[in-house]
Amino acid sequence: MHQKALIREAWASAGLYDEDDPKLQQFLAQLDDPNQCWAGMARLLRRDFAAYKDRVVPPILAQGDTLTRLMVARAIADTEDEAPLLETYIAASDPVRDEVVLRAVAERNVPRFNKALKRRRNLTPSVRATLARTAPPVQATPQRPPRRRGARRPPAPSGLTVSRVDD
């Protein structure tokens, strides 16, 4: 598969295949397993090789193939250990070259990722439009909290007097 070759090349360029770490090499070898699918690779990375996420994901996001970067960016979860990988990618991205990936991230409508996108300068109009569509609606009038039973009435507005009429 074309994407597997690109990922293998990205990991080679990052020097991962040269590292003397048996567990890392065990994970990298999973890419050559013809029975291994992308979802399986992601599950395996999260379950058995979580300590290597910050070493294997950035080289994939840094390579030039849009489809491969899109698959990885959509697979990154909004968790404390994975979200920083996507936030770093967003900050370093080229808004024009990475427009498709950035728009897909905005479409996920994850507040943390949308915040990172909004900090990014020079976003293309399509990414900005996607962010605008996914933004939570702005409430026109603030809602008053319900009054508690037995609570005192608020004082009358100034200038008005409230009098009691006794018969």
Image (cartoon, rainbow, N blue to C red):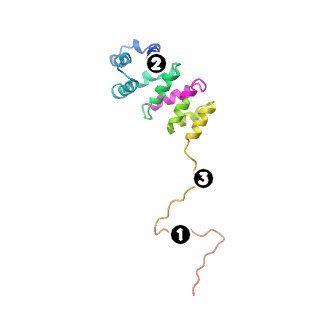
Q: Residue at x 34, y 28 (%)?
A: 47
Report if residue 63 lies within the magenta region. no
Find the distance from the CA under tag 3 to the CA under tag 2.
47 Å
Q: Where is residue 30 in the image (x, y as percent from the top left)?
A: 36, 18
Between discs 3 and 2, the one toward the N terminus: 2
Q: Name the residue under label 2.
A: 3
Using residue 8 as the reference point, say whether residue 96 is left or right of it: right
Residue toward you, 84 or 47: 47
Amino acid at dot 1: Arg
Which image quadrant: the N terminus? top left
How far apart are the alpha carbons under marks 1 and 3?
25 Å
Tag 2 or tag 1, which sits nearer the N-term? Answer: 2
The nearer-to-camera label among 1 and 3 is: 3
Q: What are the residue bounds of the magenta stretch?
A: 82-101
Residue positioned most to the top: 18
Residue at numbered disc 1: 153
Q: Which residue is drawn at 59% across and 39% down?
A: 132
Which residue position is annotated with label 3?
140
Q: Which amino acid does label 3 sit on?
A: Ala
> Is the residue 52 above or below the residue 131 in the image?
above
**SS at mark 2 in the image:** helix
